[in-house]
Amino acid sequence: EDGEPSSNSNTAFNILLDILYETKEHELGLKYFVMAESMNIYATLKEFDHKKSVYKLDLHSMRSNPAIFAIIHYLKLLKKVNKKYDGIGIDKNADCEIVTGIGLTSMDWKPIIKPLTMDLLDKRLSHSISYHAPSYNEGVIILDNESLETYFESNKALKLNS
């Protein structure tokens, strides 16, 4: 009624993305994730701004399978932005971060999103991306700009390995 998505919409998309992930319908899942993002059911790109050279993906409050689709969408979007601003590209000093939402307030629950993200970046994508997790903020994963550059130059499509 007020333009905000309902919790039922969020639950429906979570279940849909879980099913599409489990049935290995990754491309379709990615399309539905993008749809949900455009409907403000997920808001993962609040701090994605080329002018400020800030490219953060925020996974706060996300379930594991929707988060996987969010990461793939984010990496594909980074590649598009880099291609769009060819010659300038993404600044080598840009902040390319994945904020997992695992911080001091969540010490009482088992963190799932951060290890899942690290595993995904390491070995489950068709193009692995190097990263580091800074000790000053345990919830953040900083992507390595050099490995992103290699990914940007690659003709290999980014997708989940089955």
Image (cartoon, grey):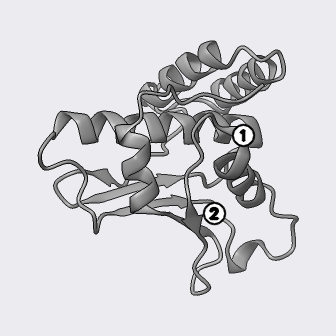
Which residue occupies the extreme left position in the image? 87
The residue sitting at 57% across, 18% down in the picture is 32
Q: Is residue 63 visible?
A: no
Q: Quadrant of residue 106?
A: bottom right
Coordinates of residue 7 in the picture (x, y in percent): 66, 33
Coordinates of residue 111 in the picture (x, y in percent): 81, 63
Gap in angstroms between the C-alphas marked 2 and 1: 21 Å
Would you place residue 22 above or below residue 81 in this image? above
Secondary structure of the residue carrying tag 1 is helix
Crowding near the residue tagged with mark 1, few <14, some 14–19, many ≥20 C-alpha atoms within 10 Å: some
Coordinates of residue 33 in the picture (x, y in percent): 56, 25
Q: Quick check: 117 left or right of 156?
A: right
Would you place residue 97 above or below residue 62 in this image? below
Q: Nearer the viewer, mark 2 or mark 1?
A: 1
Q: Quick check: 61 left or right of 56?
A: right
The residue sitting at 46% across, 63% down in the picture is 144
Under mark 2, the amino acid is Gly
Which residue occupies the extreme bottom position in the image? 136
The residue sitting at 42% across, 26% down in the picture is 38
Q: Give the mark, 2 or 1, whose residue is nearer the N terminus.
A: 2
Quick one: quadrant of the C terminus?
Answer: top right
Coordinates of residue 137 in the picture (x, y in percent): 58, 80
Residue identifier under label 1: 124
Residue identifier under label 2: 101
Q: Quadrant of residue 25?
A: top right
Q: Is residue 38 visible?
A: yes
Secondary structure of the residue carrying tag 2 is loop
Nearer to the camera, 104 or 155? 155
Nearer to the camera, 51 or 145? 145
Under mark 1, the amino acid is Arg
Q: Quick check: 86 left or right of 10?
A: left
